[in-house]
Image (cartoon, rainbow, N blue to C red):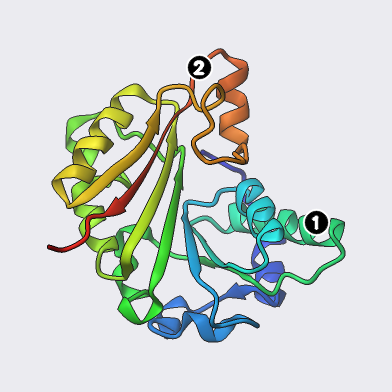
Amino acid sequence: MRIRYKKWARPELEASSFYVNDPEAQKGKWRELFKKPENAIHLELGCGKGQFISQLASTNLNTNYIAIDLIDAMLGLAKRNIESAYLEKNIEPQNIAITRFDIERIPLILDKKDNIERIYINFCNPWPKGKHRKKRLTHTRQLEKYKTFLAENAEIFFKTDDDDLFLASKNYLEETGFEIYQQTQDLHSEDIFGNNIETEHEKMFSEQGIKIKALKARICEKE
């Protein structure tokens, strides 16, 4: 998604208590950032404006969350949406951290000590051209990178409007040792997440009559 430059974003992020300016320095030490470091850590890749993570994190205070995006303007909006969601519930955002980083280089900021138990990937760029498909956040190349910091039996929750990306992602997951244990071609008729939180893209595509595809996968147990 393209977004206009917002000159206020960088100063606001740097002043925020839950923005991490140097994520590489946190590698292996992410849980130290949270008030309850013993809680599980879940990760959203490509958080955009933060509508999803703001509602998810402010509703599930016994889980810690990290949200990553590459664009300051997006993260600035995410920061404001997170603040609004927590303020509405009259609580402090102590179980969430947001940071700016290139997801293709994610092993530089996370490792096994961080023990990430779940990844959320919502409506990522489908990169339809063959030469660009390795950029997909669900591509085998990326999945192998995620395995370097995922906990045993960790999960990936994935949503998309794109039929080709959904089919390809299922193949990528199986190729890299993940088991797809729930999936649907129409999330809004069959909510496999139990309490689905809609993203901005999800609402837009649904209003256009496009069905939302979704799946839940986990790393297969070693025999």
Mark 1: few/some/many CA within 10 Å (<14, 14-19, 20+): some
Q: Give the labeled residue for mark 1.
A: 84
Q: In terms of image quadrants, where is residue 98? A: bottom right
Amino acid type, mark 2: Ile
Residue shown at 34% from the left, 22% from the top:
163
Residue 205 coordinates in the image, percent (x, y) = 55, 22
* Of the image marks 2 and 1, the number of the one nearer the N terminus: 1
Residue appearing at x 46%, y 37% in the figure: 123
The Cα–Cα distance between marks 2 and 1, rounded to whole angstroms, is 29 Å
* In contact (CB < 8 Å): disc 2 and disc 1: no
On the picture, is 18 further left or further right than 134?
Answer: right
Q: Position of residue 173 (x, y in %)?
A: 23, 45
Q: Secondary structure at mark 1?
A: helix
> Disc 2 marks which residue?
210
**Quadrant of residue 200 in the image?**
top right
Helix, strand or loop under label 2: loop
Q: Amino acid at mark 1?
A: Ser
Which sits in the foreground, 100 or 53? 53
Q: Dot 2: few (<14), some (14–19), or many (≥20) neighbours within 10 Å?
A: some
Q: How many marks?
A: 2
Image quadrant of residue 201? top right
In this view, the residue in front, 177 or 167, is 177
Specify the label residue 59 is tagged with.
none
Please report the residue visible at 56 percent of the width from the left and 75 percent of the height from the top: 20
